[in-house]
Image: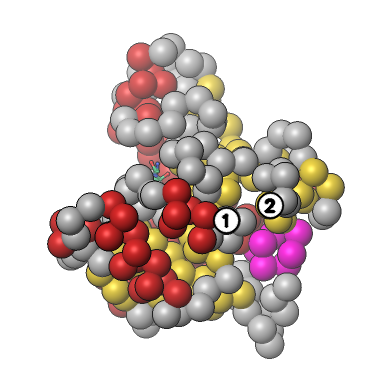
Amino acid sequence: MADAVNNPLPIVVLISGRGSNLQSIIDSVAAGDLPVEIRAVISNRPGVQGLQRASQAGIFTRVVDHSHYPDRAAFDKALQVAIDAYQPELVVLAGFMRILTPAFVHHYQGRMINIHPSLLPEFPGLNTHQRVLEAGRAVTGATIHFVTEEMDGGPAILQARVPVLAGDDAESLAARVLEQEHRMYPVVIRWYAEGRVRLDTERQVRFDDVPIKRPRQLDSEADAPC
Ligand code: GAR
């Protein structure tokens, strides 16, 4: 368990692009709200904005370019070596847009979390907001979950609900969901750092040692960020 001042939780953040969720984590750490040390930011794409954000914050960056590897297994092996060089206790996927091999996922079981812009298990995968609109949903949201072999499918930790408004297009909806996403990672990473959230051997999320049947909700009183 991390001690906020003396023993911050070491994390590595994986990105593929813009890095706005990464920025929310960086900002929370800088504000003294998050007892973590971001040891590195690793991208599978060179030249992306998230790498610039990390550099500006003085964080180590690495690129492990998936296009340089013959197959997923070889890429994931190289990625694992790159991550483990920083000895993180938690791996945070923040807009990391790669399907991961079972061997990689197994290596980080219970130590890797992902954010996805829907109320999982609904709408995993790409083009989420467009599909939500086409399905005529009145409510959407975002989910943070432990990563398992199933893409966007692991046990959920925290959700935020966002109304779909008349006149929304995929862009306006994505922007409103993203506002909530930016509040969510600092909350969940703090829970993890404080030892409050864990994946147990039955692959159940435990919160304060109690298995939770449903993900926690961002705006329930107890979960509101201070
Ligand atoms: C975020 O909306 C995140 O939820 C989504 O990509 C975006 C990354 O934005 N992730 C997925 O769809 C994963 N399946 P960011 O790079 O600005 O954080």
Q: Which residue is mark 2?
A: 199
Q: Position of residue 88 (x, y in %)?
A: 52, 73
Instruction: Report the residue at 37% width, 29% height from top.
Output: 128
Residue 23 counted in the magenta span: no
- Answer with left or right where residue 176 lies relative to residue 33: left
- Answer with left or right where residue 207 lies relative to residue 102: right
- Magenta-highlighted residues: 190-196
- Answer with left or right where residue 102 lies relative to residue 19: right
Describe the element under mark 2 as helix, strand or loop.
strand
Residue 134 visible in the picture:
yes
Which corner quadrant holds the C terminus?
Answer: bottom right
Give yes or no for contact between labels 2 and 1 (Cβ–Cβ under 8 Å). Answer: yes
Looking at the image, residue 26 lies above or below residue 165? below
Looking at the image, residue 146 lies above or below residue 30? above
**Along the line of sight, which residue is nearer the eye, 73 or 84?**
73
- Residue type at mark 1 is Gln
Mark 2 surroundings within 10 Å by alpha-carbon count, few (fewer than 14), some (14 through 19), many (20 or more): many
Sequence-first tag of 2 and 1:
1
Residue 39 visible in the picture:
no
Question: Which of the 4 image quarters holds residue 133?
Answer: top left
Q: Position of residue 116 (x, y in %)?
A: 46, 41
- Asked which colour scheme the image uses, the reply is secondary structure
**Along the line of sight, which residue is nearer the eye, 142 or 146?**
146
Instruction: Report the residue at 72% width, 51% height from top.
Output: 201
Instruction: Report the residue at 29% width, 74% height from top.
Output: 62
**Along the line of sight, which residue is nearer the eye, 20 or 193?**
193
Q: Position of residue 63 (x, y in %)?
A: 25, 69
Q: Position of residue 152 (x, y in %)?
A: 47, 39
User: Which of the numbered marks, if any, corresponds to residue 109?
Assistant: 1
Describe the element under mark 1 as helix, strand or loop.
loop
Looking at the image, residue 188 lies above or below residue 157? below
